[in-house]
Image (tube, rainbow, N blue to C red):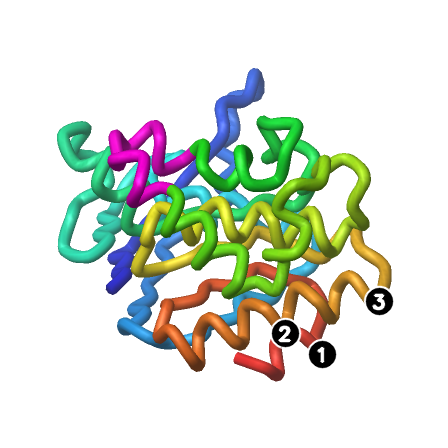
Amino acid sequence: MIKTENISFKYPTQESEELFALKNINIRINKGEFVAILGHNGSGKSTFAKHLNALLTPYSGIVCVNGMNTTDVENLWNIRQTAGMVFQNPDNQIVATIVEEDVAFGPENLGVPPLQIRKRVDESLLSVGMFEFRKNSPHLLSGGQKQRIAIAGILAMKPKCIVLDEPTAMLDPSGRKEVIDTIMKLNKEENITIVLITHYMDEAVNA
């Protein structure tokens, strides 16, 4: 599903020294796996996560997602459809004023026919336990509910893998539980590959 070979990445600096955020990282993630990546702040977790759906490309080495090399620009559309990404702050991912419209945004951009979009939206909201909130404003929901809406928006694009970059970092304990329960369910019941970036050990033990 996902394979990295000796990937390294460095951010531009004004200093002459080379500061690598990633250095010679090798990993293989198989279809249907739930993988947690742990590390302290500043250890390169988010940088690594962004390589998995080609938001960043490596300074050296190779990242392949479902057999597609992330450095090939012709693959970008398919890679980002294959590996969806959920970020830390749910407010940064919400683009509409009604929950169901927000979830529909991704498939609309993919050119999915309207009747199929309706089906995908309903199925995605049911999968994350948010169907009853479909007519609500996302901004009136709790942090955990917003993050579940963000996950539903990715689900509606039918990814094979979801990469979650510290999705519970801004949530209270009940919100954290909502999100972790949701991604565990998606992994077990729908066989979606999960890559969870976290610094919480209790979340990692679920992988």
Residue holding disc 3:
173
Judge whether residue 60 can be spotted in this image. yes
The local secondary structure at tag 3 comes to helix
What residue sits 57% from the left and 62% below the top?
128
Which of the numbered marks, if any, corresponds to residue 166? none
Q: Is 77 drawn above or below residue 132 in the view shown?
A: above
Mark 2 neighbour density, 10 Å: few (under 14) some (14–19) many (20 or more): few
Task: Give 149 or 132, whichever is nearer the viewer.
Answer: 132
Measured from the top left, where is residue 141 in percent x and y?
78, 45
The majority secondary structure of the magenta stretch comes to helix
Range of magenta residues:
106-117
Residue type (three-letter) at the residue carrying disc 2:
Asp
Disc with the residue nearer the chain's start (1 vs 2): 2
Residue 168's image quarter? bottom right
Q: Is 95 drawn above or below residue 170 in the view shown?
A: above
Residue type (three-letter) at the residue carrying disc 1:
Asp
Using residue 167 as the reference point, say whether residue 72 is left or right of it: left
Of the 4 image quadrants, the one containing the N terminus is: bottom left
The local secondary structure at tag 1 comes to helix
Q: Is 27 drawn above or below residue 74 in the view shown?
A: below
Residue holding disc 2:
181
Residue type (three-letter) at the residue carrying disc 3:
Pro
The local secondary structure at tag 2 comes to helix
